[in-house]
Amino acid sequence: MRLFSEFGLTQILEPSRLAFHYTGNKQAEGVKVMSEGLEILEGEIRGKKFFGGDAFGYLDIVVGWIAYWLHFSEEAAGYKAMDPARFPGIDL
């Protein structure tokens, strides 16, 4: 779980800052890294209620909030990290 909490920081949070604060190549780089990270996290939770299965746990606290703020960040900065083609079934 600690590996995925570090993963959330380096592959989601830091790249989202690039995507939010910059335009052009830096923004595109942040979006690419973040999209790849989100895809990995999606694969880890697919078919489960929480990252730990049926029980809410540490990883749900550390990375579970991403889905809440991501669409606000995408709209404010004009980027799209969660492409519906890569994340089917997610209402974007």
Image: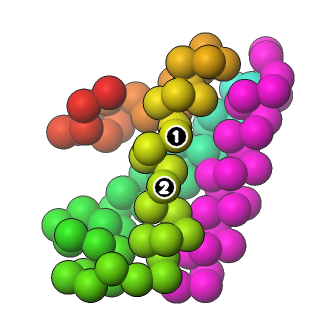
Query: Per the image, is 50 magenta?
Result: no
Residue highlighted by disc 1: 69
Q: Residue at x 60, y 74 (%)?
A: 5
Q: Residues within 10 Å of mark 1 (few under 14, many from 20)?
A: few
Q: Position of residue 15 (x, y in %)?
A: 72, 44
Q: Residue at x 26, y 84 (%)?
A: 55
Left or right of 87 in this view: 88: left
Position of the C terminus by quadrant: top left
Left or right of 8 in this view: 29: right
From which residue to which does the magenta span run? 1-26
Considering the whole magenta stretch, tell me its main secondary structure: helix
Q: Is residue 9 visible?
A: yes
Q: Position of residue 31 (x, y in %)?
A: 63, 34
Q: Is residue 12 above or below residue 46?
A: above
Q: Is residue 50 above or below residue 12?
A: below
Q: Nearer the viewer, residue 37 or 53?
A: 53
Task: Using the numbered discs, state the Cα–Cα distance from disc 2 to disc 1 in whole angstroms.
Answer: 7 Å
The kind of secondary structure element at disc 1 is helix
Q: Which mark is residue 65?
A: 2
Residue type beneath disc 2: Trp
Q: Residue at x 75, y 50 (%)?
A: 14
Q: Which mark is residue 78?
A: none
Q: Nearer the viewer, residue 79 or 36?
A: 79
Labels 2 and 1 touching (C-beta < 8 A): yes
The kind of secondary structure element at disc 2 is loop
